[in-house]
Each structure stands twice: as C-alpha cells, then as structure tokens.
Amino acid sequence: MSDSLLKLALKSSYIAVAGTHHDGVQALIESIKKEYITDGFEDFDFVEIYADSIDIEDAVNRSMSPPMVSKRKVIIVKNPDSLSKANAEELDNVFSSLDEKSLAVILFIDEFAGSVKSVMKTIEERFSKASVYQHVVVRAGAKDEMKKFLKERNLSLSEAKCDELLEKTHGTLNNALNILNMWYISGDDAIINEILTDGFDLDFSQTLQYKISDAFFRRDKALTIDIIDKVLKWNIMNIDGIVLMLMREIEKARNPSGFQFGFVNNEAKRWRIESLAYAFDSLYLLLRELRTKSSAYSELLIQENIINILERG
C-alpha cells in the first residue's frame, strides 16, 4: 500500500497517517525515507519528533528549515496524542504552511482501536489541515479470493488496482466483492474508475445516494440525471427507491425535527418551503405513475420530473 501513500505525498506536504498496526505503519515510513532521503543525510533531513517529550520551539525550527541535500525534508511526529491542544494547533498551522521541499507526517497508531475510522476522529479534531492516509491491514488471502472472483467472471483487474480497491474498501473483502459484482452485472468499466478516482468516505452505494440528493438540491439537472443513470445501470437502486429516497430527503428539509437520525442537506436549507412542497408532491405523483405505467418509460419519466422540478425554482 506504500504506493498510495507516496502518491498522496506528491500532492501534499502534510499528511496524517491513521492506522491500527504499528509494524505496518513503520514500513510505510521506511518507504518514504527511501524515496526522499539521501543516504548519509538522515541526521539532517529526516526529523523524528516525539510528542511526549517535545520542545515545541525546537520542533518548529527544525520543521521550517529546508532540506540540506535530500529531495525533501521529512518530519515524522510520533505519539501525537501526548500533545497539548496549543502545541497540536501550532504544529497544524506550521505543517500546513510547508512547501513541496518538505513533508510532515503525523503517525496516529492505535493498536487497540476497533477500526481505522475511530482513529480518524482524533485526527479530524486535532489536525484538521492534514491530508489523511488510512493504513488498512488486509486479511491474508483476500487478494487471492478477489482474483478467483474475477477469473470466474472473465474480468481483468491489475494487481495495483486490486490493492487500491481493497484500500478503498478499508480492507473489507465483502465490500470489494460487492463492487466487483456490480461491475460484472452492469458490464460498465466506469464503475471501477469511479471508485478508484473518487473519495468515498461512506459505503459506496450510500455515497452515490448522497451525490444524487446533493446534486438535486444544488439544482444541477445534468449531474443529477447522470448519477441516477449510473445508479440504475449498476443495479444499486431501482427507480422507486431513488424517488422514495429523494422524497425522504425533502421531508427531512421540511420537517427536520421529525427525523431522529441523519442530517439535512445544506443546499436543501436554501430552498423555499413552497419549492420543497412542490418537489415532494411532484415526486409522489411520479411514484404513483411509475406503479401504473410500463417500466419501459420509467427512466424517461424520472428525467422529465427532475427537470421540471429543478427548472421551476
């Protein structure tokens, strides 16, 4: 998985690594060291800061100085949970100002955490300006099972993309196989590219549902219809499900106190009550029409209704 970290390092000078496996994360650091630090200049260009015994002024000075010889200066912060709130905030500001000649990496490793996601929460609270890399430990044999699945269905995916897919699905084989199955059923290669090039913090299907409602409330007709087409083609939801989901999101915006869970889309809050009511009623009538007419016209019906609702204003 070190390739993914190195790709992120090309885009960012400030990374927080979230992990639950100490040896695995240490191997990542060795790959960064090998990539950027010139042999013999480790003492000058590779800085390790132990947060539980930090001298914040010294840490800042060492972080801000440029590399002596190496391609980049690498600053590693260990045991960041030991930092005071003030010191964490100062390092967050300093590291976010680094240029491409330096790379700061904060290591959040909690071997007792139930998942990487629980480690992520701490990062978001204390180091919000960092780009986050999730180090996922993949179960032994998971990739072999993926390859077997692909071979049985005459699908082909490179070794690197298999690794990337497992990383995107947080090392969960079932989630990876579900995505491969969607690819197989739809016959659309775009589904793999969509996942590997986009950031999915939620379950894949939940993310696409969110994208439909977000594009809808932004009144982006083309994007809403495009995502709906993908969801239908990839057999993630049927048209009834999409309409019901949009009706639920509209009702949450109309009556947020009536929903114990979930949040109201920020764009939906900008809609007038009359517009929300019109959209809800239109979708309700569409749902009734879908259940009485031939399914051959269902995709056309939802497209027409989406356009009418969003053009009405």
Image (cartoon, grey):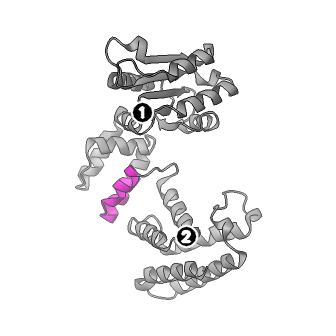
Asked which quadrant contains residue 9, the reply is top left
Residue 43 shows in this picture: yes
Residue 193 among magenta residues? yes
Asked which quadrant contains residue 46, the reply is top left
Asked which quadrant contains residue 273, the reply is bottom right
Q: Give the range drawn in magenta.
A: 177-197
Q: Picture coordinates of residue 282 (x, y %)?
A: 60, 83
Going by the numbered disc 1, the residue's amino acid type is Glu
> On the rendered image, what quadrant is the C terminus found in?
bottom right
Residue 254 among magenta residues? no
Q: Which of 159 and 180 is in front in this view?
A: 159
> Mark 1: which secondary structure?
loop
Going by the numbered disc 2, the residue's amino acid type is Phe
Residue 291 shows in this picture: no
Would residue 88 appear left or right of 225 to someone viewing this image? right
Q: Which mark is residue 100?
A: 1
67 shown above or below 6: above
| Mark sitting earlier along the chain (2/1) | 1
Most extreme residue toward the bottom is 293
299 shown above or below 118: below
Contact? badges 2 and 1 (CB < 8 Å): no
User: Depth-wise, is mark 2 or mark 1 nearer the camera?
Assistant: 1
Which residue in the structure is indicated by mark 2?
216
Q: Picture coordinates of residue 248 (x, y %)?
A: 63, 69
Would residue 82 appear left or right of 184 to someone viewing this image? right
Q: Which mark is residue 5?
A: none
